[in-house]
Image: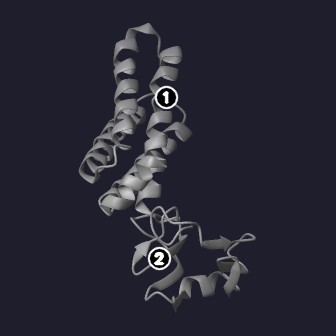
Amino acid sequence: MPLEPGGKPRVELYDPGGFKNVQLRIDGEVVHTFADHAELQAGWKEDLSDDRRLEVALRQRYGSFLPRIDVRVNGRALPGSSWDPAHMVKGASNALLALAAWPLLDIVTAGAQNMPLLIVQAVLFAGLGGLARTGRRAIVATALVLATLLLALRMVLVFYSPVAWYWKALSVLIVLWMIRDVRAAFDLAPRATSAATRA
C-alpha cells in the first residue's frame, strides 16, 4: 500500500490467518508483529521520519459487523487498505455492475410478462454502478444512495414473494453491505476519489 494516492507501495500487511502473527512491513522491513487478535485490537502507532504518524488496528467502521485491519496515516486510510473509502466505493461499483445481471436472470424464471420491468432494473443497476466510478464525491454518494433504495425495494418484493429463505437473507445482506459503502462514500477525499476512478 502507498502512503499517499499515486505513490509507490511501501506498506505491507502479512496475515498468515486468524489475525495471528500479523506482520507490518515498511519498505520490505518488518517493523512490528501483532501476536494475536487482542494486540491487533489494541492497535499500534509509530511516527515516521517525515512527520507522519502510521496507525494500525483491528477496527469496525461504517456500521460494519465484521472488523478489518485499519491502516492509517495522519488519520486517513491508506489507499487500497481495507477501510479506504475509495477502495470500498470501487468494490460497490463493481458489485452494482455485477448485480445488473440479477434482473436478467429473473427473466428466465419469471417469464416474459415481467421482462420490461426487469430490463429497466438491469439498466438502473448498470447505470448507477457506472456513476459510482465517476470520481466525484457527490455523484458517487448519490448513485450509491439510489442504488441502496432500489435494492431495499427489491428486498421488500423478495420478502413478499414465494422464494426460499436464503434469497431473502441474501437480499438483507446486500442492502446492509450497500449502506456501509454509502457511509464510506461520504468520507471520500477528492483526490482519493479520483485515484479510485483511474485504478
Q: Between disc 2 and disc 1, whose residue precedes?
A: 2
Q: Circle 2 sits on which residue?
A: 72
Nearer to us of marks 2 and 1 is 2
Q: Circle 1 sits on which residue?
A: 102
Circle 2 crowding by C-alpha within 10 Å: few under 14, some 14–19, many from 20: many
Instruction: Tell me residue 23's x, y (percent).
Output: 69, 79
Residue at image point 50% right, 34% down = 98
Instruction: Tell me residue 156's x, y (percent).
Output: 35, 37
In the picture, measured across the screen, residue 94 lies left or right of residue 152, that is right
Secondary element type, mark 1: helix
Instruction: Tell me residue 92's x, y (percent).
Output: 44, 47
Q: Amino acid at mark 2?
A: Arg
Residue at image point 51% right, 73% down = 70
Q: Nearer the viewer, residue 58 or 129?
A: 129
Residue 162 appears in view: no
Q: Amino acid at mark 1?
A: Trp
Q: Is residue 101 above or below residue 170?
A: above
Total labels drawn: 2
Circle on res. 152: none
Q: Is residue 62 above or below residue 111?
A: below
Image colouring: one colour
Residue at image point 45% right, 25% down = 103
**Looking at the figure, which quarter contains the N terminus?**
bottom right
